[in-house]
Image (cartoon, rainbow, N blue to C red):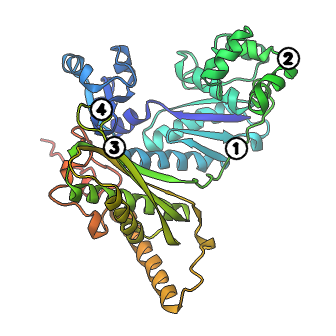
């Protein structure tokens, strides 16, 4: 049996853990630059606030209904996600992290254990240890477990847990699910299936295997098997290394100065380097891009340039150096830039790094020192908080606020910054 555990309204739940006054109150979390709603509490959903709606369109209802508003606090959410996953792994050893708020669990090693009791224990323990409420769906396959998870979350009777294994019930629920809602069915397949009178998940379930094989390739066939309780999608307990890494942000206001964009780009290159080191990889290519707002009346311009590194690297200093060289090639004065970014590609494992054929002992020594320096930086930043130590080019200056994301409603980084730790106060009882 496979389980899918999902943290309920995850971003909102993270904010509520450290601010209990938010319980039973409408809460929304906004996207980068406080642009759109990306998370809502159930109370906010009841007010009719839609996912993705621009924030400026709901300011009136926010004021009238006293909706609590927060900017996305990615440092907090990422750390809370790790805590949830760690708590789950203490009880279920075989776990695949599917997203920041979802994990697949493999229960096959538990034999005839009462999965309902185990599921209740998992939900209860995660809530107790992290403060995050969860919903857990359990079924024979990943696809069915997603359906079971939906039932656990939305149903008033299942209370956050549903074990879906009765074949008749599976068919009844499949009849209620549009085929477009199934995992892996996109718009193109939805239209194609509709032409053959396949509108619900049950319609696909009842379609002959040979027809699926002929018209939906191997991906559709796997889905068909999964709907019939035959596992085809195995748990991936170790995350596959990314083939490329991109870091980019829109500026909080339009930028015209090269020095400002250099600082932003150096920051993005530093982030890419940190992600490379965390993944245990080095890069061979670094691509830099800049662009103006395509929807404004200002003159339009966008461009990119790719540098090939002389040697594979994940050193922040090296990536910043070549990112800035690329920027000088594509920057044009007179434009109001809205966004810039860095993408690294041609990734290879760090232990398979290819050095120059003409490298000497001095170059090897420099490489070793660079690796040591980056290791020390990462250790300090992990211990004392992100960006405690930074390369000078990417350090914050007086002009940083002009390009950093607009986060007017940002909550403290309660778990990753010493300065933001909650402080307990003794109250004298008279």
| Precedes in sequence: disc 3 or disc 4 | 4
Query: Are dots 4 and 2 in contact, CB under 8 Å?
Result: no
Residue that badge 2 annotates = 208
Q: Position of residue 363 (x, y in %)?
A: 49, 86
Q: Is any part of residue 162 visible from this angle?
A: no
Query: Are dots 2 and 3 in contact, CB under 8 Å?
Result: no
Residue that badge 4 annotates = 35
Query: In the rendering, which numbered label is found on residue 235?
Result: 1
Residue that badge 3 annotates = 73
Residue located farthest toward the right when viewing the structure as drawn: 210
Secondary structure found at label 3: loop
Task: Quote the CA–CA distance across marks 1 and 3.
Answer: 29 Å
Secondary structure found at label 4: loop
| Precedes in sequence: disc 2 or disc 3 | 3
Secondary structure found at label 2: loop
Q: Position of residue 242 (x, y in %)?
A: 57, 53
Badge 3, how many Cα within 10 Å: few under 14, some, many 20+? Answer: many
Task: Quote the CA–CA distance across marks 2 and 3.
Answer: 48 Å
Q: Position of residue 236 (x, y in %)?
A: 67, 47
Front residue of this view, candidates 146 and 240: 240
| Precedes in sequence: disc 4 or disc 1 | 4
């Amino acid at each position: 049996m496979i389980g899918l555990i999902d943290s309920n309204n995850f971003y909102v739940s993270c904010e509520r853990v450290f601010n209990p006054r938010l319980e039973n109150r409408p809460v929304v979390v906004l996207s980068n630059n406080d642009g759109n709603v990306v998370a809502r509490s159930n109370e906010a959903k009841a007010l009719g606030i839609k996912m993705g709606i621009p924030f400026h369109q709901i300011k009136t209802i926010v004021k009238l209904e006293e909706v609590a508003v927060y900017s996305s606090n990615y440092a907090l959410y990422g750390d809370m996600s790790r805590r949830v996953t760690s708590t789950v792994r203490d009880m279920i050893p075989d776990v695949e992290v599917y997203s920041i708020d979802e994990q697949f669990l493999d229960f096959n090693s538990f034999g005839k254990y009462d999965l309902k009791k185990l599921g209740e224990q998992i939900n209860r323990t995660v809530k107790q240890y992290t403060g995050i409420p969860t919903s857990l769906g359990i079924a024979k396959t990943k696809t069915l477990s997603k359906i079971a998870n939906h039932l656990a979350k939305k149903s008033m009777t299942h209370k956050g847990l549903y074990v879906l294994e009765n074949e008749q019930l599976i068919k009844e629920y499949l009849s209620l699910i549009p085929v477009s809602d199934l995992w892996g069915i996109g718009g193109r397949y939805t239209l194609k299936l509709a032409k053959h009178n396949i509108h619900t998940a049950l319609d696909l379930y009842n379609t002959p295997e040979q027809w699926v094989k002929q018209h939906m390739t191997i991906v559709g066939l796997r889905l068909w098997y999964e709907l019939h309780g035959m596992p085809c999608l195995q748990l991936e307990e170790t995350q596959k290394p990314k083939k490329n890494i991109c870091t980019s942000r829109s500026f909080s206001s339009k930028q015209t100065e090269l020095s400002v964009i250099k600082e932003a780009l150096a920051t993005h290159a530093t982030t890419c380097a940190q992600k490379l080191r965390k993944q245990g990889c080095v890069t061979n290519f670094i691509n830099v891009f800049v662009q103006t707002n395509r929807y404004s009346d200002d003159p339009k311009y966008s461009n990119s340039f790719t540098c090939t590194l002389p040697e594979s690297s994940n050193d922040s200093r090296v990536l910043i150096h070549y990112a800035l060289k690329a920027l000088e090639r594509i920057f044009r004065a007179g434009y109001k830039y809205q966004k810039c970014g860095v993408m690294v590609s041609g990734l290879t494992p760090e232990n398979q790094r290819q050095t120059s054929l003409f490298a000497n002992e001095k170059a090897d020594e420099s490489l070793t020192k660079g690796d040591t320096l980056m290791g020390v930086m990462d250790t300090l930043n992990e211990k004392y908080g992100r960006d405690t130590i930074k390369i000078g080019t990417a350090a914050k200056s007086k002009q940083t606020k002009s390009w950093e994301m607009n986060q007017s409603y940002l909550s403290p980084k309660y778990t990753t910054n010493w300065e933001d730790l909650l402080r307990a106060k003794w109250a004298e009882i008279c």
